[in-house]
Image (cartoon, helix red, strand yellow):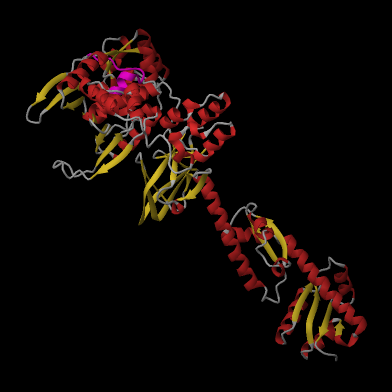
Amino acid sequence: AILNTNITDKWNVNKNKIHKIITTNHRLKIQSSKDHLFFVATSERIIEKSAEELKQGDYLIMPEKIHIKGKIQKINSKKYYNSFIITKEGQEFLKKRRLKKGLLQRQLAKEAGLTQTTISSYEIGKLNAYRMPLKRLCSKLNIDFDKFLKDYTQPYMYRNISLPNTLNKEFAQFLGYLIGDGCIETDRITFFEQNKQLALTYQKKFNQFFKINSSYRFRESKNYHQIRFTSRPLVRLIKEEFPEIRKALDSEIPKKILQSDNGIVAAFLRGLFDADGYVASKRGIALGINNKKLAQHTQLALLRFSILSSLLEYNNKANKYSNNPRFTVDITEKKSIQLFKKHIGFSFHEKTNKLNTLLNKKSDSSYSRQIIVSGRKIRKLIEKSGYNLELFPKVNNFFRNERMMSKQTFKNSILSNIKDKKLYNQLEVIYNYPILPIKINKIEKINKKIKMVDISVKIKNFIANGIITHNSAARFARIREGAAKDHFKKVAEYMKNQFLTLKELKGIIVGGPGPTKYDFVDGGYITNEVKKKIISIKDLSYTEEFGLQELLDKSQDVLAKEEVAVEKDIMAKFFNLLSTKPGIVSYGLNEVKKNLEIGAVDILLLSESLDDNIIDEMENLAKTFGTTVNIISTETREGVQLREIGKIAAILRYEV
């Protein structure tokens, strides 16, 4: 199913190479990195391919229709009027708020940048309030301006105009026409139209809608008809509620339009096609504009009505007044043209007549709206139900997977001949699948540095430029997993080269945040020789220098145990030699000191209970002859024994 969902994650990425993929019948265009995943329809099933694996002739998939459950878009239009009549309740409310703050009228006037007369007039209803002074006053009294307007005022109109409180069909059509053939200034909106009848149609329609008297004139020098709506409140409303409407090359379909139901979207598109749309007598319906993003948005908006279109780009050299490229949204399939007529249509009867003539000439065949299930699979379903394939003489090539089939042909040549109810229902489900195959016509590989955006959505996949593509989150997860494995291998190789050559190495402690350290240790990356030397694994909160310090702090217990183990081993060696080769050991301060002075001591054992001065003296003597010094704690049985035999002992290099 195709569902509406929010973006959950976004990544900005830098790429050195992009793949530009262009489809045919109908024409879509999408750019991606080489490793972005697409869905490809094959004769057996739908598979995943990265952009670099795609080839000309592959079939991507697209939605036949985009279903969006729109909502009513409310507009707080009152706040855009120029001046207001404050009700009795509003006058009293302002006065009470001033007194609550302990302000005289002149004090409040000074703080708000107004005159005392203005404050007084507002409180007694002697003066209508202009928008900006009233807004400043509300701000100083900590009053919500919009709520105050709603609860305590009525618009006062020097120039009569009625602003809409919701985004309805009429206003949506006005906005569509404005984006196509209008311009917006500080206090007026102007339309420029080649056709007089259409210009007068829009003037009459929106004079009634806004309850305003617009002006009309024919600009003979420029050969266009001009309609002008002069109203600062209307301009203010459009600029604040629909900020996507900007200059011709920068405008987009407003968010409020896209979040509305299909009736509102259709009305907007009607206005846009009234302005910049046309009917080509042999080809179809087209919208020609210089704004690429608007053309792309229009193409997607048309899919809400299952209208399939192509996006074409021209260099526009023939136009001596513009250097900008030209973009055309092209609707050529008969069913799409029928759907356009049904849901959108034109306001000008001449375009409508051309549209009807076009439909009468158009063939029902479609290279765009095709069955996505292979002919071989459908043939097997039919044969399994006991049908003779001779009943379908015109579709043998389809049954052999030699060509695709349009949905209309499928309906006329196959479905219409099926009498078995169970089989009919199975084939009808296939006919109604909401996705279509779309053939790749060309793939361009471009080497250039470019900033790209990858997104993740709550459900598995998303639509990009009309094509159903793979969720980036899954791809990033695979990329991260592969990168992690490569990193683990490099670290494991480094450990082997560095640690196995260290004869003095006592042990390895592994630390890190999260479960990664366990994946590394237990994932088969480390050789058995290195793994045997791992004495502990620690959980950390940090990495890099802070992480290293944290690892040292958290490993004190392990390091202490290792030191004790070393002490026990060396003391065990001493007592073993004492019982088997007493001539190779000595103990007691005087005897050990004598052996130290002649360089006979290999390992010096000092109890931590010795006086510090003696420890320092013995260590200095040991350094002279390269003797290893071990300080032995009294926490072990062996350490206690050393203390009892004089607190000092030695293993000699030779018998003395």
Residue 638 is inside the magenta segment: no
What percent of the width, then of the height, locates residue 9? 49, 42
**Which residue sits furthest left?**
221
**Which residue sits furthest top?**
88
Q: Quadrant of residue 257?
A: top left
**Residue at the image point whose x is 46% and y is 49% from the top:** 36
Q: Quadrant of residue 510?
A: bottom right
What percent of the width, then of the height, locates residue 308? 36, 33
Magenta stretch: dominant secondary structure = loop
Query: Which of 393/246 is in front?
Result: 393
What percent of the width, then of the height, locates residue 447? 36, 58
Residue 247 can be seen, yes or no: no
Q: Which residues are magenta?
A: 160-173
Q: Is residue 598 above or below residue 114?
A: below
Q: Is residue 431 above or below residue 515?
A: above
Q: Is residue 137 above or below residue 526?
A: above
Query: Which of 401/81 is in front?
Result: 401
Name the side, left or right, on which 266 lies relative to 656: left
**Residue at the image point whose x is 86% and y is 81% from the top:** 588
